[in-house]
Structures are given as C-alpha cells and as structure tokens.
Image: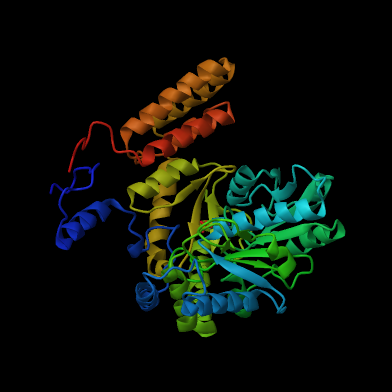
Amino acid sequence: MNDTSFRTHLPPQGNPPETLWEIMTEARSQDAPWQAGRVFSLVFWAGDDVAAVAHEAYSRFFAENALNPSAFPSLRRFETEVISMTAHLLADDDAVVGNMTSGGTESILMAMKTARDWARAQWPRRTPPEVVLPATAHPAFAKAAHYFGLTLVPIPVQEDFRADVAAMAAAISPRTVMLVASAPSYPQGVVDPVAEIAALAQTHGLLCHVDACVGGMMLPFIARLGYPVPPFDFRVPGVTSLSVDLHKYGYAAKGASVILYRHAALRRQQMFASTDWSGGIYASPTMTGTRPGGAIAAAWAVMNYLGEAGYLRLARTVMETTQQLQAGVTAIPGLQILGKPTMSVFAIASPRLDMYEVGDEMTLRGWHLDRQQAPPSLHLTIHAGHAPVVPAFLADIADAAAAAGRLRPRRLMWHLGQRGAAGLLRLLPPALASRLTEKAGALLASGGDLPQRSAPLYGMMGALPHRQDVEALVLDLLDGFTRPPRGKGAGKR
Ligand SMILES: *Cc1c(COP(=O)(O)O)cnc(C)c1O
C-alpha cells in the first residue's frame, strides 16, 4: 500500500492492523502538534494520568449504546451522576435537571429548541420567536436559529467586550422569548453581566440561557482559588438554562457536554417521543439517537478521578500560566490583551500591527493560534500543557511582533494593492464582485491546504464588499473538505 495515495473505494481484501497503524501514523504527521503545547485551541490537556483514565473508561464502554437507558443500567447511572455532579457545581437547587449531549453545540441547540417549543406553548403569537443575544455569543446559537426557525437579534457588545444590557433591553420586542449571556464568551473570554441580563429576562417574563460551555468547569474552581468571578450560574435568579462542556475544562473525552434547566417543566419541551412507529415506542431526550457509551463512561471516570482537589490543582496551574502569558504579552511593544478576560481564554490584538501578519510569523515559528476578526486578533485557550512553553512562546511572539512591524517593501505594496482592490470591489456591480470571489474560492480550493500565510486570505475576505460572498466562499471550502482531491486516487483500491 502506498501510504500517501488517496483511497476512494473499500479495499477488496482487508489489511493487517500494522499496515493501518503505519498509514495512520504517516497521515497525522502534519497534524497540529498539541502534545508539545504549541496549539492554543481544540485540545484540553490535563496530564497523561487523566488521559489514561479517560482512555481506559472509554474503551471499557466502547461498544455500549446509551440510546436505550434500560439496556445498560451502568451507563444510566454514570450519566445521572455526571449530570448531578455538574449541576451541583452550578446550582444550590435540587430542582435543576439536565441531560448529557455530544458537545456544546448540541447543548445550545437543545436550549434553543426548548425555548422555541416553550414559546409555542406559552406565547403562541410570538412568531417567529426572537432570541436577543450579545454579538460575541457562539455561532451555535446562529446554527440553532438556522435549524429551528428562530430569529436572532445580535447586539453589539460594549467597549470592554461584555454584553450591552441597555441595548439588549431596547431590543426586546413582542416576539422575544429568550435572552442569552456567555460565561465567558469565546472570542475575548469575558463574562457577560449575567445577573443584569437574567434580571432583565425576569422583568419581561423571558427565558435566559447562560452559555458556560467553556467556563462551567473552570469558573467555580477559580472562584474558590480567590480569582474574581461575577455570578453566572443558577444562583443568579432568572437564569433558566445553562450549557457546560465536560470535554473542555472537565477534561473528559470528546463528545461530552451537559445541558441544564432550572426546572423539569422547561426541560420537557426539549424531549421527543414517537409512539406509532412499527419499530416500537421511540423516545429520545436530545438530538442524537445512538449515543456512545464511551463518552459517558470517560466523563464519569475523569470527574471521579480528579475530584474537587484535582480540578482545583489544574485550575491553579492554568490560571498561573495564563497570568504569565498575559503579563509577558502586554510587555511587548504593540501588543495588548482585549478586554479583561475572567479566566484562561483571551485574545491578543494590536492598535498598530497587522495581527494576521503576527499570526503568520507565529505559524512560521511553529505555533498554532486561531485568527479572529472585529477586531483582528489571535485567540488563546490555555491548558496545563502550556505551562512549560511560556518562555518560548513569549520570546517568539516578541520576534513575530517585531517582524510584522518592520516595513517590508513587498508586503507594503501588497497591502496598498489590497486596499485598492477593496475600493475597486466596492465600485463593482455585485455580480462582477461575486465572480471575482468565485475565482478566489477556486484558487483556494485547488491549492488544497490553506496557505502557510493566511494574512492575505483574511485580508481578502475582509475586503469583500458583500457578506454573502464571504459566506459562499467559506461554504465552497467546506464542500471541498470531504471530497477526494481531484485527479488523485481515482479507482484506488
Ligand atoms: C466551545 C464552545 C461552544 C461550542 O461547543 P462545541 O463543543 O465546540 O460544540 C459554545 N460556546 C462557547 C462559549 C464555547 O467555548
């Protein structure tokens, strides 16, 4: 078997496992090197011991399916305990109920679907139902609105990147059913004024969802360590639902999140049952049918392995690492931290440097940082695996900032050209601008991999006059992601 060739058909004969391991090892050689602490998103590392516990628990329940809780009382027990342990971190109230889901997105989809159906029952005239949320809220809310027929009313945030409560109040209409707050938001890591938003919701008799996907398993512990944490959970009157991911700072295996509701009557609107199918009575609380037993077992095992003491120890390391990184970055001329991040998620920006150039310089030095827009910034989510790399990171980002600040004639020309192009695109009729975008999309798709330097890409996207053009370009890319590369591997067996 040629390791680099692309397979499009099932092989006629099976392969020995060693062959597969060889191909898989080769295939991942270009993957982001998170093990070295060089990746600042997607992975949450808590130590080899924690990973081993998750791994072992997952393997033990590898085959089991949590679709039918009566077949596997073990999984039912683990899931119930996971939900209860999570709820009691975030509520004093035993009335809080919830379910495990596959991740933050599914938890938010469920909260939105529940809000829609609660509204249908309580306020049938509020159609389409509207959800008022800070513009920094996670795209999962937009996805849910897209799937379930709700209308989102995104409200620009304040200068400190926290939700603007007065503007949210002004946006409440006769169709509003729910307000949203993030604890914290993903882009800048700041906790919205949850108490004020929940009070506003209460005044208007509305639902209030708190997105604590990234913060729910971190904020309770850093609060106990003495870091300032504004109230954000069910202890705040008026909060009616809350999402919290276990596969982030809960350090569980991927595929583990919890959606919680203040009371069971609200949660009832989440559930689904079909009673007339010839296959029998089918009932399911969340989006998915078959659910992996491994994800539930691993979450249960990790929570019981770490306990409060383990989470506190990890939270301390993560916060100390975060503070060292933030202090170091702030000391570098031209760089700053956006807002006042509450925990270990934050963004680096600059009033004068092109942050996409800084990001490209960091990529060239072997670091993986997500790019953000409005304002342009680099995003970091810190885990314990970053503790040893602080000095190396700070040295490299200082170099990267210096490199991005140097006037390079070729790059300057490019930027001038791009500004010109932006102006030109604005003058073009939309159809012509779209054609240009199509060409840009084809160019990127044929390249296969995203280029090492993405600053031009982001610059180009920012320069496109129509948001639909950017969306079309992104969807074209997505469409291409799971297609075999053209001309390669045809008929390969
Ligand atoms: C990660 C995250 C989500 C989405 O969670 P997934 O597990 O990626 O689906 C939602 N909201 C916030 C604030 C997040 O950080």
* Residue 378 x/y as whole percent: 49, 50
In this picture, residue 76 sits left or right of residue 113: left
In this picture, residue 140 sits left or right of residue 394: right
Question: Residue 5 appears in which quarter of the rendering?
Answer: top left
Colouring chosen for the image of the structure = rainbow
Of residues 50 and 356, the one nearer the viewer is: 50
* Residue 430 x/y as whole percent: 57, 18
Q: Residue sitting at 15 percent across and 62 percent down? A: 18
* Residue 292 x/y as whole percent: 43, 66
In this picture, residue 222 sits left or right of residue 177: left
Of residues 404 and 206, the one nearer the viewer is: 206
Of residues 327 and 316, the one nearer the viewer is: 316
Res 231 visible: no
Question: Which quarter holds ligand 1?
Answer: bottom right
Res 404 visible: yes
Q: Residue sitting at 47 percent across and 25 percent down? A: 437
Q: Relative to 492, does residue 69 appear above or below in the rendering?
A: below
Question: Residue 346 appears in which quarter of the rendering?
Answer: bottom right
* Residue 233 x/y as whole percent: 69, 69
* Quadrant where the image shows the C terminus: top left
Extreme residue in the right direction:
203
